[in-house]
Image: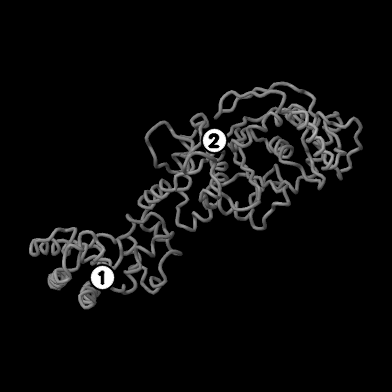
Amino acid sequence: MIRTRFAPSPTGYIHVGNVRAALFPWLLARQQGGKFILRIEDTDQARFVEGATDLILDTLDWLGLSWDEGPRVGGEHGPYFQTERRDIYKQWAQKLIDAGLAYADPYTPEQVQGFRELAKAAKKPFLYRDYRPTKTPEWDGTQPLRFKVTNIKRYTWNDPVMGELSTGEEVLDDFILIKSDGLPTYNFAHIVDDYEMGVTHVIRGLEYISSIPRYLSLYEALQIEPPVLACLPHIMAPDGKKKLGKRDGAKSVTDYRTDGILPETMLNFLASMGWNDGTEQEIFSREELVEKFSLERVQKSGARFDEQRLLWLNGQWIRRISLDDLYGRVEPYWPEAARAASPEDRRAVLALVQDRLKTLAELPLLTSYFFTEPTPNWSMIDDNKQLKKLSREEHLQLLTAAKGALEQSDFTAEKLQETLNNLLEATGQKPGILFSLIRFALTWAPFSPGLPETMAVLGRERTLARLQTAIAAA
């Protein structure tokens, strides 16, 4: 059975790269009927952030990336926090000590720095194994424990994404297994944990690829068969020239959630960053991603982060979900004035703007004028490319004619459209001028839904009153 894992560190907010590193192994496990494990790698206590673990779990919940083993659900391979697995690491460390493949590091940081300077003076790369002590004390946990690499050779391995890779002996070195605080390093702990938890496929970012030869040397020393090791291409900054970072405007996934990005959108967006199914399809449901995903179709080159595409995808997904579903999701985003309106009125307004929303956070901008009386702002008309060609007198004549015609109309969207069409003939104006003028007078907003539908929701009384207010304010 395929067993994959996501093993984040609780050291801050969870960003898009973290989520993609969870999504791809989740997709593989779900597609193959396997298991997806969540493990919290909390051994870096200096960078530990209170509340970060809950943030990770809540984000995965929001995205629907359920885990089969791990925090909150348990499992037979726990504990799932590395700080609770110290005894397990010590047992594996002792195996290496007994085999003569690990030793207590007696050197101070100042001595190690001296070795680095010697290597630099000799114009050689610094390798710790070149300065390995000949006599070492018995390891008592107060000193770092180092791996003693003895099989110095070239390693070759196959990465399902990057293809066949190999590297020379120059990258192999003695590295720390357990720190002086008694906690293991990532290089040691993840290998032990993946083996103990039966992980068959390790899928992570490309930044780990240079360390894989060291991992392979440790797998060999521990007599462990390595799992499939796959590295994902970087998510690149918008200019495509470097890895995406905070300085490039990358936000936490929580921020995108707060901004009104749907979880369906985020999954769709991140899955298609570096992967495609070989077709022109752009909108993928979670079920379609599970069905079509494969590591072999993950591209080798970096995927550019395009926030405009994220917004476009979000608009597509907002239009795909039902009005009832959307109504439940937008509850926190209504403008304050909408709270006093009936659920029926809010639902009618939402139905009107659903096709125009790009994010849920745009709801106040697109709907506030349905719930509060807008303040006339004739400068908006004067700045409009089409409307500024007319005089103020012509503006008022058209609004007066519109008010008179609408007074005689039924206030269904169909009848209002018919009234507006008749008004076009009577005034001899273009739709872009007449309809835009009426829309401004009713909403004083830069954009709004279809005019007949807007008036139908506003109703006769408010529509006529707003036209009169606009005329009086000119």
Residue drawn at the location 60% of the way across and 44% of the way down: 68
- The amino acid sitting under disc 2 is Pro
Q: Which residue is mark 2?
A: 233
| Residue 409 seen by the camera | no
Q: Quadrant of the C terminus?
A: bottom left
Q: For residue 428, which quarter of the picture? A: bottom left
Which of the numbered marks, if any, corresponds to residue 378? 1
Q: Is residue 150 left or right of residue 62?
A: right
x and y percentages locating residue 5 in the rendered image: 62, 40
Gap in angstroms between the C-alphas marked 1 and 2: 52 Å
- The amino acid sitting under disc 1 is Trp
x and y percentages locating residue 86 in the rendered image: 78, 45
* Label 2 packing within 10 angstroms: few (<14), some (14-19), many (20+): many
Residue drawn at the location 54% of the way across and 50% of the way down: 247
**SS under mark 1:** helix
**SS under mark 2:** loop
* Label 1 packing within 10 angstroms: few (<14), some (14-19), many (20+): some
